[in-house]
Image (spheres, rainbow, N blue to C red):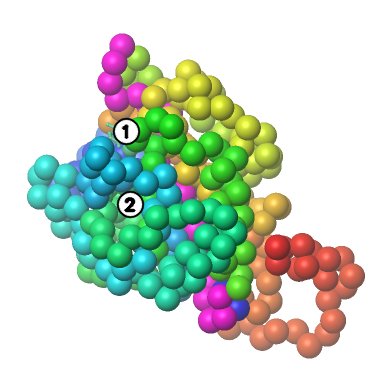
Amino acid sequence: MARIIAGVSSSHVPAIGAAIDLKKTEEPYWKRVFDGFGRSKEWMARQKPDVVIAVYNDHASAFSVELIPTFALGCAAEFPPADEGWGPRPVPVVKGHPALASHIAQSVILDEFDLTIVNKMEVDHGLTVPLNLMFGSPKEWPCPVIPLAVNVVMYPPPTGHRCFMLGRAIRKAVNSYPEDLRVIVMGTGGMSHQISGPRAGLINSAFDKAFLDGLTRNPQKLVRIPHVEYMREAGAEGIEMVMWLIMRGALDDKVKEVYRFYTVPASNTAVGHIVLENAPRAAHRRGVPVPAKRPSTKGRRAVAHAAH
Ligand code: DHB
Ligand code: FE
């Protein structure tokens, strides 16, 4: 059986991608940002996930304003980097996992989340920058990645609650996939930022840090944040943070916060990052044999609960 082992969230600031591509990561302004992801890259290298589900938003690269799906699941075998105006980023083609993606589509749609199925799509900085932050700049991405594009570009985006419940439905889908896969869910975008208008440059560290706290300890409080509050407190583009709630919904109720990082600014944006682990279950620890003895009553209850 497949299982979600952890969730990761990170900003996707396009200038971070440009800093990598133009080899500026050692400059003091950018080193401050990249140093914050050093431990995360080590953590990711130890996890060796079989698949990543990357919740991200397209910035009018794959979908123009003529067609904007609320939730679009990438079921293709590969997703090339998009040309965002300066040619495609020099990053590897993202290899998908069509079998797991189709299974998720089947399960989630029958659970009444009407996803758009995407069989051909290019992916922009919203996806490729977080992959760089977590995996560095390898020749090939180390595992298949299933993109889940969320509309946070044109109002109305989905509510935080809807996002969280979609995460729950994705967890159920993954848990019912027969192959023994260890899956990590990434939520991307944010944190507070506003790119244009009189409030351009807005950053609200207090809001961002409370959001990070809530992700670990009390996501139910976050799911009720209305759009207008994101807009007011975190800026027009701060709404990207609802995507982190899909990641959180896909995890267990109780999680272990392994790491977090926060710095301001990078370009116009507050950069936030968090790594949350589900409690390991014996069968999914790499190389650890399943214990023969029966789990305690408490343990059995925990396993039964997490299977939903
Ligand atoms: C910036 C941030 C974004 O999330 C984005 O999509 C574009 C630009 C910025 O900080 O400049
Ligand atoms: Fe963005």
Q: Which residue of the protein is positioned furthest toward the right in this rendering?
A: 297
The residue lying toward the viewer, choosing from 69 and 226, is 69
Q: Is residue 193 magenta?
A: yes
Q: How many marks?
A: 2
Residue corresponding to mark 1: 266
Question: In this picture, is 293 found above or below 3?
Answer: below
Q: Is residue 216 left or right of residue 49?
A: right
Q: Is residue 30 left or right of residue 105?
A: left
The location of residue 231, given as percent across then percent down, is 45, 22
Q: Residue at x 60, y 78 (%)?
A: 1
Amino acid type at mark 1:
Ala
Residue corresponding to mark 2: 127
Q: Helix or strand or loop: what does disc 1 sit on?
A: strand
Question: In this picture, is 168 found above or below 288?
Answer: above
Quadrant containing ligand 2 reads top left
Amino acid type at mark 2:
Leu
Q: Residue at x 68, y 72 (%)?
A: 281
Question: In this picture, is 3 found above or below 292?
Answer: above
Q: Is residue 201 left or right of residue 227?
A: left
The location of residue 197, given as percent across then percent down, is 29, 16
> Quarter holding the C terminus?
bottom right
The yes-or-no answer for disc 1 within 8 Å of ligand 1 is: yes
